[in-house]
Amino acid sequence: MKKNQNGPFPDSSRDLILEKAMSEYGNDIYYIVYSYVKDHSLAEDLTQEVFVKVYKKMDTFREESSLKTWIVRMAINHCKDYLRRWDTRMISFTNTINDMVKGKFGTPEQSLIQEETSSELIQNLLSLPVKYREIIFLFYFEEMKLAEIAECMDLNINTVKTRLAKGRKLLGAAYQNSEVYNNG
């Protein structure tokens, strides 16, 4: 794509690029935002704000990373900024993401078991400190490579590896202490 003086995107193609980004990455960005705020309606609002910010800052995209990585980075930063605000710290987030991961199984019993297991896994994931949760989420749910995670989070790749290993260990310990694991 030919770069112009305002960045890599000509003004005429901004709308199309934003529309394509929203359709391709909208759900991914929503789940990332949700992993921070743990509230569905708030995650929807913040996701919209992220894409408004993407549209406004599109001419600052320098193509040093993929568009998805750039948008994920923007979403993470937007969530961190939101959570740092004084008024936000006063809000308690209590919703869970039981409906985020839905399994498709044959019998009602299998479906219920899968739903309960997924719910427990997600609850355990959300109970992790954010520095481990975000790495695990990006690696497993978004299927990002370690180098992409390091780039979008502005971390050293060894830090990402360490946090992923520690997060797995914490998640495994939490899961082993769970009711589903002990009763299953």
Image (cartoon, grey):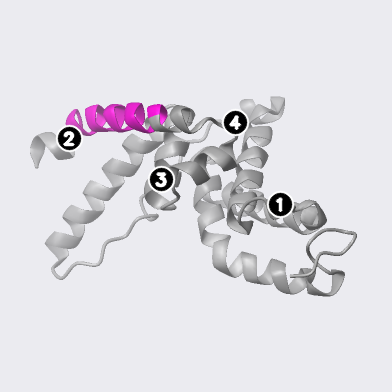
Residue 124 at x, y percent in the picture: 32, 35
Q: Determine the CA span between mark 3 and mark 2.
A: 26 Å
- Residue 67 vs 19, above or below: the answer is above
Q: Which residue is mark 1?
A: 49
Residue at image coords 71%, 52%? 49
Q: For the residue carrying disc 4, how many other residues have a C-alpha within 10 Å: few (<14), some (14-19), or many (20+)?
A: few
Q: Which residue is mark 4?
A: 91
Q: Which residue is mark 3?
A: 139
Marked residue nearer the N-terminal end (3 or 4): 4
Given the image, on which type of amino acid does mark 3 rest? Phe
Residue 50 at x, y percent in the picture: 68, 51
Of the residues tagged 4 and 1, which is closer to the observer? 1
Marked residue nearer the N-terminal end (2 or 1): 1
Of the residues tagged 3 and 4, which is closer to the observer? 3
Marked residue nearer the N-terminal end (3 or 2): 3
Q: Determine the CA span between mark 3 and mark 1.
A: 24 Å
Residue at image coords 59%, 56%? 68
Q: Which residues are magenta?
A: 162-178
In the picture, which quadrant includes the N terminus? bottom right
Q: Is residue 54 left or right of residue 157?
A: right
Marked residue nearer the N-terminal end (4 or 2): 4
Residue 80 at x, y percent in the picture: 63, 34
Q: For the residue carrying disc 2, how many other residues have a C-alpha within 10 Å: few (<14), some (14-19), or many (20+)?
A: few
Q: Determine the CA span between mark 2 and mark 1.
A: 38 Å
Q: For the residue carrying disc 3, how many other residues have a C-alpha within 10 Å: few (<14), some (14-19), or many (20+)?
A: some
**Residue 171: in magenta span:** yes
Marks 4 & 1, CB-CB < 8 Å contact: no
